[in-house]
């Protein structure tokens, strides 16, 4: 299974549990045209010039994963949030800003401070992202526990699913925040067109855990 699919599946599970609101019924057998979420709702990247310098070694795309005869070739399908980023980049950002403390736990106050720095000119989006962080935190911690248990049972799990340089916890948490913000995007930011509306409805109604 490709890492991109794993990330997307986990993000959708996060959002399903975190956002328990009713939606218009959608025919889940008819997948709409994929639209990169950032084209419909440009959720800000939580970076500054200083943070980019501090995390410069992870600012590019991830290194290519070695292929195997059992793994299908990588295809040119777009990532749910645009171009792939290095799996350690968000961990570096969260560590530098202490959003993840020395105890490895998420810190809501530090995340709000980061929002006040990076998203200070868009209060609507900042509020949505703060709410998204709160909604995603509990499920992120649950996932962190499950990943640790899976790695303990099967040390090859981390090599198969993720780059071994860092934990996927931060990237998955941020992915959840972005997808949650995408679903609750402020009307002043949302690109209100047929394709974006159809794609958001499909994600909200159909991407549920089995």
Image: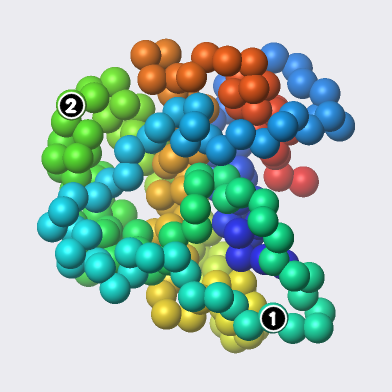
Q: In this view, does 160 lie above or below 41?
A: below
Q: In this view, does 5 lie above or below 135?
A: below
Q: Do the residues labelled 2 and 1 touch (CB within 8 Å)?
A: no
Chain-order first, disc 2 or disc 1: 1
Q: Is mark 2 on a helix, strand or loop?
A: loop
From where the camera sits, is residue 22 visible? no
Q: How is the model colour-coded? A: rainbow
The residue at 61%/43% (across/down) is 12
Q: Give the alpha-carbon distance from disc 2 to disc 1, as whole Å.
A: 44 Å
Residue 120 appears left or right of 107:
left
Residue 18 appears left or right of 45:
right
Crowd around label 2: few <14 · some 14–19 · many ≥20 (10 Å): few
Residue 116 appears left or right of 160:
left
The residue at 48%/80% (across/down) is 164
Q: Residue furthest right?
A: 29
Q: Quadrant of residue 35?
A: top right
Q: What element carries label 1?
A: loop
Q: Quadrant of residue 136?
A: top left
* Mark sitting on residue 121: 2
The residue at 22%/34% (across/down) is 119
Q: Where is residue 129 in the image (x, y as percent from the top left)?
A: 34, 34
Q: Is residue 60 above or below residue 25?
A: below
* Mark sitting on residue 3: none
Q: Where is residue 38 in the image (x, y as percent from the top left)?
A: 47, 36
The residue at 39%/59% (across/down) is 170
Q: Position of residue 126 (x, y in %)?
A: 27, 30
From where the camera sits, is residue 192 visible? yes
Crowd around label 1: few <14 · some 14–19 · many ≥20 (10 Å): few
Mark 1 = which residue? 67
Q: Position of residue 208 (x, y in %)?
A: 70, 39
Observer-nearest of 76 and 56: 76
Observer-nearest of 73 and 97: 73
């Amino acid at each position: 299974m490709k890492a991109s699919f794993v990330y997307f599946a986990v993000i959708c599970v996060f959002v399903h549990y975190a956002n328990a609101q009713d939606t218009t019924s959608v025919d889940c057998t008819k997948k709409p045209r994929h639209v990169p979420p950032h084209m419909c709702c440009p959720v800000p990247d939580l970076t500054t010039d200083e943070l980019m310098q501090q995390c410069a070694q992870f600012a590019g795309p991830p290194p290519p994963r070695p292929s195997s005869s059992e793994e299908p070739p990588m295809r040119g399908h777009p990532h749910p949030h645009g171009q792939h980023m290095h799996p350690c980049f968000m961990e570096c950002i969260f560590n530098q800003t202490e959003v993840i403390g020395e105890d490895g736990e998420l810190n809501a106050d530090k995340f709000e401070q980061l929002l006040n720095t990076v998203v200070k000119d868009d209060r609507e989006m900042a509020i949505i992202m703060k709410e998204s962080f709160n909604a995603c935190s509990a499920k992120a911690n649950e996932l962190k526990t499950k990943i640790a248990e899976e790695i303990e049972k099967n040390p090859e799990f981390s090599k198969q699913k993720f780059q071994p340089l860092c934990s996927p916890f931060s990237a998955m948490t941020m992915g959840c925040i972005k997808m949650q913000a995408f679903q609750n995007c402020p009307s002043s930011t949302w690109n209100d067109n047929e394709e974006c509306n159809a794609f958001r409805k499909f994600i909200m109604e159909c991407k549920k855990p089995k």
